[in-house]
Image (cartoon, helix red, strand yellow):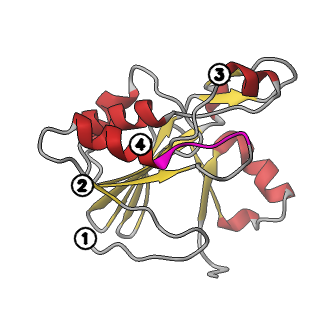
Amino acid sequence: MNDQAKIVVPAPVTDVAADGGLARDRLIPAVQGSLIKDRDVTVHPLPALHGMDDPGPAVYEFRDGRFLSYLIDIGGVRVFHAGDGLLYPELAPALQELAPEIMLLPINGRDFMREQAGLVGNMDEAEAAWLCDQVRPAYIIPMHYEMFAHNRGDVGRFASLVHEQAADGGPVLVMPSRGRPFTLEI
């Protein structure tokens, strides 16, 4: 682990991160639309539509910039990490413009019963596959599946949908083994 690495966090939660034990001098507050640059790394913070797990049915909102996804450009390779998030009208056009080669997308979805139990969800397999078709990355890494009981995505269904929607065969799906590091060479 690199104890000198900078950590990008949404600006509204900088104090929470510091109170949680992260060194304040390592934290870089992120605000949607404001680029963060350090040597050959550029971070593009984008708003993320996220569920709130308040008691009762889940409510999905942007919550004052506290929820972000990130497009990270590292030496010319662009990676989009959706984090926890849902589709919203401006997401696909923003990503089309930023043109990520790699996308990490949640596929665990959401439904009424889970929301009633306080489990907020994310994009489901069909939504994530649709976003891939709109953006056309070279590689897709599905995430947020098989993490929690009753809050799973179907990676097989996701893979099928991605390939059904892509006229040219679509992007390469990368599904790393659980808990093991991997290297993707581009």
Q: Is residue 45 above or below residue 115?
A: below
172 is within the stretch colored magenta: no
Q: CA distance from mark 4 to mark 1?
A: 23 Å
Q: Secondary structure at mark 2?
A: loop
Q: Secondary structure at mark 4?
A: helix
Residue underneath mark 2:
138
Task: Please give the range of residues in magenta.
Answer: 150-155
Q: CA distance from mark 3 to mark 4?
A: 23 Å
Q: Residues within 10 Å of mark 4 (few under 14, many from 20)?
A: many
Identify the mark nearer the N-term, 1 or 3.
Answer: 3
Quadrant containing the N terminus is: bottom right
Residue at x 80% of width, y 58% of height:
18
Front-lying residue, 98 or 14: 98
Q: Secondary structure at mark 3?
A: strand
Q: Tell me where residue 22 appears, x and y as whole percent.
A: 77, 65
Q: Residues within 10 Å of mark 3 (few under 14, many from 20)?
A: some
Marks 4, 2: nearer the viewer = 4
Q: Are marks 3 and 2 in contact (CB under 8 Å)?
A: no
Identify the amino acid type marked 1.
Ile
Identify the amino acid type marked 2.
Ala
Q: Residues within 10 Å of mark 1 (few under 14, many from 20)?
A: few
Q: Is residue 97 visible from the viewing direction of this image?
A: no
User: Would residue 147 appear left or right of 130 to someone viewing this image?
Assistant: right
Residue 186: assigned label: 1
Q: Secondary structure at mark 1?
A: loop
Q: Tell me where residue 129 appears, x and y as whole percent.
A: 36, 37
Residue underneath mark 4:
158
Q: Residues within 10 Å of mark 2 (few under 14, many from 20)?
A: some
Residue underneath mark 3:
60
Identify the amino acid type marked 3.
Tyr
